[in-house]
Image: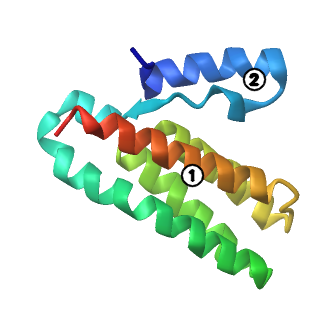
Amino acid sequence: MPPVESNRTYERNRVVSKNRTGDASMSIPEKLVSDLIAEDPDMIDIVEEFVATLSNRVGEFQEAHEKLDWELLATLAHRLKGAGGSYGYGPLSELGAEMETAFRQQQAEQFQQWMQQLERLAQAARKGLEGAT
């Protein structure tokens, strides 16, 4: 059976993986379950709506990056940070925080890696919803 992780388990494993390899992207689980749903299964519809928007966010980031619109990049990252936490996806919040800090300093060397992480987290969140509906 594929691994299913809540955000709390993800965080513990991410720290261990990052310490071992220096690459936090390696620890993204196949399925990521929202802590919000874990605490209140009735919130599934709201969480599903949020997860459905994640792919669009990648496109928004890419557009802003092409224009080197640092303010918009930082704003998008800030929104991801807040929404990720609000919807019970700590890993999305953490990624948003990392990107926001970098974009405010006009740094985007890891942009492609971040977009890959965002896409992988979105996929893991979608898979995490499969058994919840």
What whole-number distance in Å separates the C-alpha atoms at marks 2 and 1?
19 Å
The residue positioned 86% from the left and 62% from the top of the image is 107
Q: What residue type is labelled 1?
A: Glu
Is 50 in front, or is 82? 50
Q: Dot 2 lies on which element? A: helix
Instruction: Work out which quarter of the rendered image holds the C terminus and state it.
Output: top left
When the figure is inspected, residue 83 is found, relative to residue 32, above or below; the finding is below
Q: Would you call the spot at circle 1 few (<14 residues within 10 Å), some (14-19), or many (20 or more)?
A: some
Residue 128 placement, left or right of 104: left
Q: Residue 72: name its quadrant.
A: bottom right
Instruction: Name the residue that disc number 1 marks.
Output: 119
Q: Which of marks 2 and 1 is nearer the N terminus?
A: 2
**Front tag of 2 and 1:** 1
> Residue 58's quadrant in the figure?
bottom right
Residue 41: % across, % down: 15, 35
Residue 53: give x, y in percent of width and height: 40, 64
Q: Return the x and y of residue 24 as percentages of the image width and height.
A: 72, 31
For residue 96, above or below residue 10: below
Check contact, mark 2 vs mark 1: CB within 8 A.
no
Q: Is residue 25 above or below residue 43?
A: above
| Side of 39 relative to 21 (left or right) | left
Would you identify the image quadrant in which residue 51 lies? bottom left
Q: Name the residue under label 2.
A: 18
Along the viewing direction, whichever of 32 and 97 lies nearer the viewer:
32
Q: Residue at x 43, y 31 (%)?
A: 31
**Nearest to the observer: residue 82 or residue 59:** 59
Relative side of 51 to 79, left or right: left
Q: Is mark 1 on a helix, strand or loop?
A: helix
Amino acid under label 2? Lys
What is the x, y in percent for residue 39? 22, 29
- In the image, farthest residue toward the bottom: 67
Mark 2, Cα crowd under 10 Å, few <14 / some 14-19 / many 20+, is: some
